[in-house]
Image (cartoon, rainbow, N blue to C red):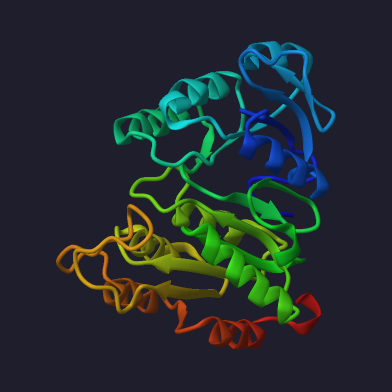
Amino acid sequence: MSILINKDSKVLVQAITGKSGSLQTKVMLEAGTNIVAGVTPGKSGQEVYGVPVYDYIAEAKAEHDFDTVISFVPPAFAKDSCFEAIDAGIKVLVLTTEEIALHDVVEIIAYAKAHDTILVGPGCAGVIAPGVCKVGAHPIRFFKKGHVGVVSKSGALSYEIGKTLTDAGIGQSSVVAIGGGPIWGFTQADAVALYDKDPDTDVIVLLGEIGGGSEEDAAAYIKANVKKPVVSLIVGRNAPQGKSLGHAGAIVSGNVGTAKTKIAALEDAGVHVVKNPVEMVETIRSLMDTERM
């Protein structure tokens, strides 16, 4: 089975009538996702690709059972909408919204933890279980069902590696993009822990980048706990110090968050660190049973 989502997941979309919400609803439905309802204040009674729309989550909850929410709500309203979703007793909240005030993000993360809700994001591409469903923005054509579990900060990098693996005939159990930081709910270490327990995942792929200590935390967890083989690619090896590259969290300050420190920590944990996608494919092939690709 996949991690975070599966064929039984029942999904609600926040801001479903907006540009991103309506587009991704269409694609998620095409991917097999069971979207039972959507929410946009003032739009109750409408439908988006056959999905009924309500003003508030409480109204949707009275009519539908759901355990997963994906939010496309604008930054200024993200905290309140996340609290509303979490109060509904959901298991997973995928927060795609970028540029949320950091103090709001801190409160959202704390609220989710206090209510045992897994928060993926903010500013993330979400998760896809190829051939089953997706809750996020991953292009379904880049992925195929298989037995490699992928976790990435970057959505775009997860797309690229997914396509590279698929083109090489290597399928994926799940692909999760947690967001570019600088702070997250669901972490790389959290994903690795779930993949290590997942019977459908044979090899774990950790896609990292400069900045912060997420990869080092994952390395420490891997060293202490993980039995399955882990392959990692760290991007930004030649990034100039003190300059943010793409993501808010992708910045090197002093000796903290460098590619060198991340690679050293991962190698010390027994991770197979590769230099490029081609080497990743070769390494995964050497670690997997060909019948499970």
- Picture quadrant of residue 28: top right
Q: In this rendered view, identify the residue nearer to me: 278 or 45.
A: 45
Percent across and percent down for residue 211 are: 30, 61
Q: How many numbered tags mark residues here?
A: 0
Please indicate, yes or no, whether residue 211 appears anywhere in the rendered image: yes
- Picture quadrant of residue 9: top right
Q: Residue at x 75, y 77 (%)?
A: 293
Q: Residue at x 19, y 64 (%)?
A: 242
Q: Is residue 171 left or right of residue 230?
A: right
Q: In this rendered view, identify the residue nearer to me: 118 or 159.
A: 159
Instruction: Judge whether 232 appears above or below 256 on screen.
Output: below
Q: In this rendered view, identify the residue nearer to me: 176 or 53.
A: 53
Q: Residue at x 53, y 32 (%)?
A: 117
Q: In this rendered view, identify the residue nearer to me: 65 or 229.
A: 65
Q: Residue furthest right?
A: 50
Q: Is residue 52 left or right of residue 281?
A: right
Q: Quadrant of the N terminus?
A: bottom right
